[in-house]
């Protein structure tokens, strides 16, 4: 007798054997008992959740000669013929390989004939989303108004690819992922019936790796029993699937959290040299860090034993929630980039080095502290220079030049008016106006800091507000505005906030312009901009304003 795969050998033969889909099963059984079976069904869900099994059971149940409470008896002539696939009245079609218009036209011709021995002719079309547009169109009329003796059961993993006209003609049932606990219980029963010796930890690992698909769980189990060894444990499963052991994943996560670059790269190389699959490896790291985050947040340990939970607890205390979230996001980005790269190992190692760099992981509070230090340094320099008479004079000259430029740039004052005798009065008026605008601008920049809008605050620090004309004001920067700073300020939420506050101050809608000028005092420059801070750190810091 030929060998039968486990997922085929233990395929459910009754509705009650399908796990995790209680609501769907109850509905189908009630329809059969009340003789209200629909003419077209759509079974949707991820792989291995019981769609095809449910379709086959439904096809037998509505044709069974001795149904039992909506279940097929599996003993009558029709049930036995359906199980072995000898019935011509129950047709199973794979749309992945039979997706042309001609295939559907053959069905349209067949439905006009009465079934040979069954009550209903049933068409089970698997992976129906693979049908061509022409095939869908050919199926429409038949699917909407089939003969009374014909039933359609469509199954798919991607219902979004089906035309709305098809969806509207079917009763849709969404099969959900099977829980790890249900998968573990079914595996335990199968192992007991098949005399397979397996540990509880191994059952847990298989249930997690199957990701809610019973068929995948059985495929993993079958792979583990092929090598002839008597007992299946957790380490054996991980070795067969190329998954690093817990200790290996834990030490790498520890190296990353503790910023230990050398040890981390060394351990990564050791794992890859052992032939572990690089995709499984990075998936395991992401999953483990996610589990650390969950444990830190809710104390839920999942499938880990006491020793492993103790190690997770230790790591959770060394990393903040923000750091763990950042690690998960960065590792996920690395995983996505690796899909399109021919140098996966290099990409992984570079990403690991980046994660182990302390400056790459500077947090919000540390950033504020560094900004404060820079502010204090700048203030200290000004106080020190004020102690020297010569430097006082230089400062007075600079202030005078700035004032004259503001007056010249203000379109409300014509320079020729100064030459006609009213120069002194207009200087007083503009100076007073500029002084009020300066105070407003300083207060606004400080308000951004208090509100936690650090990106705005750091890029506008030490800038001046200059009125250009009745409709425009300029933000004058102490040095050339960089592309980084410009990109930050031009974000819609930032420029709109500045425009709003400035318009309120002037009592009318004002437009904002950015004014560049080269820095003339490089030696005394203590820039407080976020870009200069990132240059000193040689990293890129992203902060999201609330």
Image (spheres, rainbow, N blue to C red):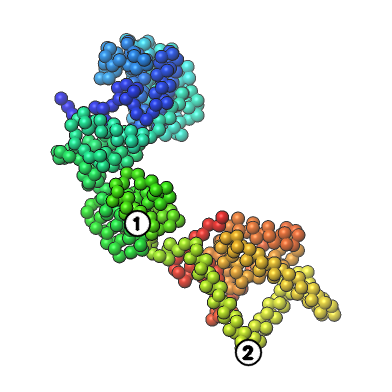
- Residue neighbourhood size for the residue with mark 2, other residues' Cα within 10 Å, grouped as few (<14), some (14–19), many (≥20): few
**Quarter of the figure that contains the C terminus:** bottom right
User: Residue 390 shows which numbered tag?
Assistant: 2
- Sooner in the amino-acid sequence: mark 1 or mark 2: 1
Distance CA(mark 1)–CA(mark 2): 59 Å
Give the residue displayed 28% in from the left and 42% down from the top: 205
Q: Quadrant of residue 84?
A: top left
> Residue 246 location in percent, x, y?
28, 51
**Quarter of the figure that contains the N terminus:** top left
Instruction: Using the rendered image of the protein, determine whether residue 416 is visible from the camera's viewpoint.
Output: no
- Residue neighbourhood size for the residue with mark 1, other residues' Cα within 10 Å, grouped as few (<14), some (14–19), many (≥20): some
Q: Secondary structure at mark 1?
A: helix
| Residue position marked by numbered label 1 in the rendering | 314
> Residue 312 location in percent, x, y?
34, 53
Compared to residue 302, the image places residue 514 above or below, namely: below
> Residue 176 location in percent, x, y?
40, 33
As drawn, the residue found furthest toward the bottom would be: 389
Q: Quadrant of residue 60?
A: top left
| Front-lying residue, 535 or 259 | 259
> Residue 132 location in percent, x, y?
42, 30
| Front-lying residue, 22 or 352 | 22
| Front-lying residue, 46 or 129 | 46
Give the residue displayed 59% in from the left and 84% down from the top: 385
Give the residue displayed 71% in from the left and 77% down from the top: 403
User: Which numbered disc, 1 or 2, marks the residue closer to the eye?
Assistant: 1
Compared to residue 334, the image places residue 48 above or below, namely: above
Instruction: Using the rendered image of the protein, determine whether residue 432 is visible from the camera's viewpoint.
Output: yes
Q: Secondary structure at mark 2?
A: helix
Compared to residue 504, the image places residue 26 above or below, namely: above
Compared to residue 368, the image places residue 291 above or below, namely: above
């Amino acid at each position: 007798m030929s060998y039968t795969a486990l997922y085929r050998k233990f395929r459910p033969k009754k509705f009650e054997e399908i796990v995790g889909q209680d609501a769907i099963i109850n509905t189908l059984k009630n329809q059969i008992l009340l003789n209200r079976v629909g003419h077209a069904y759509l079974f949707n869900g991820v792989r291995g959740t019981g769609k095809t099994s449910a379709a086959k059971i439904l096809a037998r149940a509505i044709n069974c000669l001795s149904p039992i409470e909506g279940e097929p008896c599996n003993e009558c002539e029709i049930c036995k013929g359906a199980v072995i696939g000898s019935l011509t009245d129950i047709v199973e079609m794979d749309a992945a390989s039979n997706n042309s218009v001609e295939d559907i036209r053959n069905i349209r011709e067949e439905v006009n004939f009465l079934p040979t021995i069954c009550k209903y002719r049933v068409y089970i079309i698997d992976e129906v989303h693979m049908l061509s547009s022409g095939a869908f169109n050919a199926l429409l009329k038949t699917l909407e108004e089939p003969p009374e003796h014909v039933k359609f059961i469509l199954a798919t993993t991607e219902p979004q690819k089906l035309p709305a006209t098809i969806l509207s003609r079917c009763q849709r049932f969404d099969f959900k992922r099977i829980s790890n606990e249900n998968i573990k219980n079914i595996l335990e029963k199968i192992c007991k019936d098949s005399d397979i010796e397996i540990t509880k930890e191994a059952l847990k690992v298989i249930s997690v790796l199957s990701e809610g698909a019973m068929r995948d769980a059985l495929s993993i189990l079958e792979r583990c029993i092929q090598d002839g060894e008597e007992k299946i444990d957790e380490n054996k499963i991980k070795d067969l699937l190329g998954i690093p052991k817990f200790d290996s994943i834990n030490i790498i996560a520890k190296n990353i959290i503790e910023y230990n670059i050398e040890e981390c790269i060394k351990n990564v190389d050791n794992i890859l040299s052992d032939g572990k699959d690089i995709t499984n490896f990075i998936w395991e790291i992401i999953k483990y860090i996610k589990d650390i985050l969950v444990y830190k947040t809710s104390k839920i340990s999942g499938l880990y034993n006491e020793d492993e939970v103790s190690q997770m607890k230790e790591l959770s205390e060394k990393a903040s929630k923000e750091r763990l979230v950042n690690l998960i996001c960065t590792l996920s980005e690395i995983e996505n980039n690796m899909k399109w790269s021919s140098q996966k190992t290099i990409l992984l190692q570079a990403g690991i080095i980046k994660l182990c760099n302390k400056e790459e992981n500077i947090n919000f509070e540390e950033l504020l502290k560094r900004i404060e230090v820079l502010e204090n340094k700048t203030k200290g320099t000004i106080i020190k220079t004020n102690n020297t008479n010569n430097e006082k004079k230089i400062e007075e000259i600079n202030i005078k030049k700035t004032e004259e430029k503001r007056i010249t740039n203000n379109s409300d004052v014509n320079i020729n008016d100064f030459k006609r005798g009213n120069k002194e009065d207009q200087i007083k008026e503009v100076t007073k106006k500029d002084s009020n605008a300066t105070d407003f601008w300083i207060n606004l920049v400080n308000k951004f800091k208090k509100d936690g809008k650090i990106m705005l605050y750091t890029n506008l620090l030490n800038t001046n507000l200059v009125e250009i004309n009745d409709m425009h004001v300029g933000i004058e920067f102490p040095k050339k505005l960089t592309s980084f700073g410009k990109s930050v300020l031009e974000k819609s939420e930032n420029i709109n906030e500045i425009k709003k506050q400035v318009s309120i101050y002037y009592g009318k809608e004002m437009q904002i312009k950015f004014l560049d000028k080269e820095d003339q005092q490089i030696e005394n420059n203590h820039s407080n901009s976020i870009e200069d801070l990132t240059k000193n750190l040689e990293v890129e810091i992203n902060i999201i304003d609330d």
